Image (tube, helix red, strand yellow):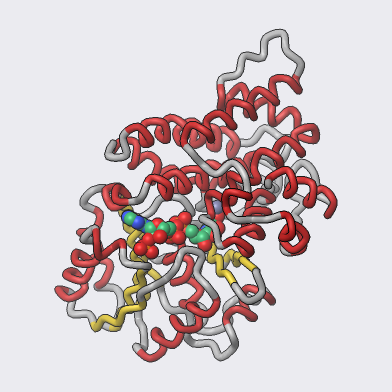
């Protein structure tokens, strides 16, 4: 393992079909005023809202509701959420939903006791929180982002076409998260699949960096194999508990900082996808799938040994008698074929992007240098054009 790192994860997880029953115990640790944060209403249709409200009432909590958190939550909505939490003197922000609700709750948590505009402070200037942070708890209803066990918070500003993530420290991570795989069963298939690709790509982003022999890469390969296997079961039978529970658990471990230990990490697919998301407001996982193959095919020559290992270890490509480059290419072909089988978006056009957006998307793409090739602007343009 190269480099120096520390590892601590501040989130307590409850996993399984009965996990919501632990909410009662957790609530004892917080004051009376709870803001219940949720999205566009899926939790009312599938009954999760009623179950959570019943527990909150049984525990004698004063509940304020902050509903309507949209996928890709906006800066405007964030300001509204801060106001609600302030007025209610929130002791706990309880997010019930997918990554959007969890991310949003974290952004509210660091802004309630802060006078500055949250978008400017955290998403433009990337300041660290300087004020009291309201604790966040999460009841997860969608597997994908890993937001339930990390400090990430991604907010979109429609006025400026910017979608920006701030990775906060352990003090902002959810204090607890409840993961009941049954809660994900009411997801539309398209969202399930977008979540699956998001998980897979989180693993790739950390895997495709470095040249040393590293425990994190072996963990990543195990997670990727599990995601591939269980995705194929889940698209045939979305009600398969074993598959859905494995997907949910893999999502958490794909992005809870563990497999980034000792790794430089790449994150360029996310930077490209996020920038495209700022223009299209498309589903997060789909923006990643749309840019992945042009990006990986572009950087593959610079990281051939790792792409060869990806092909043989993750996709079972037989390397006998083949040049390294051919093996690496076959690995990406296997990934492409899996992506088509599960039904993710294969280009940005189907997500609403058009050629006249390319320059703006390129301008909005943060360029990192942890991967095998630090991109020049022309390369970003080329990859985006190939992704259309
Ligand atoms: O709003 P509701 O009605 O709840 O519907 C949601 C939403 O329309 C629906 N949904 C969720 N659970 C459901 C359900 N529908 C039926 N049954 C259920 N059980 O699914 C839709 C998408 O939900 P959302 O929370 O937006 O999806 P996801 O979990 O993919 O979160 C996406 C956001 O997370 C950010 C993304 O950029 C995006 O803004 N990310 C956060 C990360 C982090 N914290 O580390 C990392 C990721 O890379 C990502 O950037
Ligand atoms: Zn993601």
Tell me where residue 193 appears, x and y as whole percent: 44, 43
> Where in the figure is residue 327, as x and y percent of width and height?
69, 20
Q: Position of residue 23 (x, y in %)?
A: 25, 64
Frontmost residue, 214 versus 272? 272
Q: Farthest residue in the left direction?
A: 58
* Left or right: where 283 falls relative to 209: left
Left or right: residue 134 versus residue 74 is left
Q: Position of residue 354 (x, y in %)?
A: 68, 55
Q: Is residue 149 visible?
A: no
**What count of labels does the image hold?**
0
Asked whether residue 70 appears in the rendered view, the answer is yes
Q: Residue at x 46, y 43 (%)?
A: 196
Reply above or below: 108 against 220: below
Instruction: Say whether residue 301 is left or right of residue 195.
Output: right
Give the quadrant of residue 158. bottom right
Quadrant assignment, res 99: bottom left
> In the displayed image of the protein, which residue is found farthest to the top?
321
Q: Is residue 145 left or right of residue 355?
A: left
Query: At 82% across and 48% down in the image, what residue appears?
Result: 379
**Residue 31 in the image: above or below residue 347:** below
Question: Please, is residue 21 above or below residue 16 in the view?
Answer: below
Task: For the N terminus, give its image quadrant.
Answer: top right
Q: Nearer the viewer, residue 81 or 283?
A: 283
- Residue drawn at x 28%, y 52% as measured from the top left: 183
């Amino acid at each position: 393992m190269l480099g120096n790192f520390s590892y601590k994860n501040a989130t307590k997880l409850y996993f399984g079909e009965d996990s919501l029953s632990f909410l009662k115990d957790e609530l004892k640790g917080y004051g009376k005023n709870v803001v219940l944060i949720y999205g566009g209403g899926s939790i009312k249709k599938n009954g999760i809202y009623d179950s959570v409200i019943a527990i909150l009432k049984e525990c004698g909590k004063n509940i304020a509701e902050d509903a309507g958190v949209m996928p890709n939550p906006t800066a405007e909505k964030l300001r509204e959420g801060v106001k609600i939490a302030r007025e209610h003197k929130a002791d706990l922000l309880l997010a019930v939903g997918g990554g959007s609700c969890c991310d949003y709750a974290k952004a509210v948590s660091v802004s309630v006791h802060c006078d500055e505009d949250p978008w400017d402070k955290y998403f433009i200037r990337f300041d660290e929180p300087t004020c009291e942070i309201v604790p966040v708890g999460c009841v997860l209803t969608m597997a994908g982002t890993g937001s339930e066990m990390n400090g990430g918070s991604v907010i979109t500003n429609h006025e400026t076409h910017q979608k920006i993530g701030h990775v906060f420290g352990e003090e902002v991570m959810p204090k607890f998260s409840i993961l009941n795989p049954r809660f994900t069963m009411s997801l539309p298939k398209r969202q399930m699949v977008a979540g699956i690709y998001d998980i897979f790509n989180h693993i790739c982003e950390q895997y495709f960096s470095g040249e040393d022999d590293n425990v994190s890469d072996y963990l990543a390969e195990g997670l990727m194999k599990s995601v591939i296997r269980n995705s194929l079961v889940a698209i045939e039978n979305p009600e398969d508990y074993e598959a859905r529970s494995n997907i949910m658990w893999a999502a958490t471990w794909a992005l809870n900082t563990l497999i980034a230990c000792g790794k430089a990490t790449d994150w360029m697919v996310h930077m490209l996808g996020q920038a495209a998301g700022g223009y299209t407001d498309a589903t997060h996982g789909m923006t990643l799938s749309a840019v992945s193959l042009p990006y990986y095919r572009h950087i593959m020559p610079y990281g051939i040994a790792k792409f060869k290992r990806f092909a043989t270890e993750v996709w079972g490509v037989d390397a006998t008698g083949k040049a390294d480059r051919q093996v690496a290419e076959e690995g990406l072909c296997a990934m492409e074929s899996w992506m088509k089988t599960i039904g993710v978006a294969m280009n940005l056009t189907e997500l609403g992007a058009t050629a006249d957006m390319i320059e703006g998307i390129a301008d909005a793409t943060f360029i990192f240098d942890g991967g095998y090739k630090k991109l020049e602007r022309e390369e970003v343009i080329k990859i985006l054009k190939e992704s259309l």
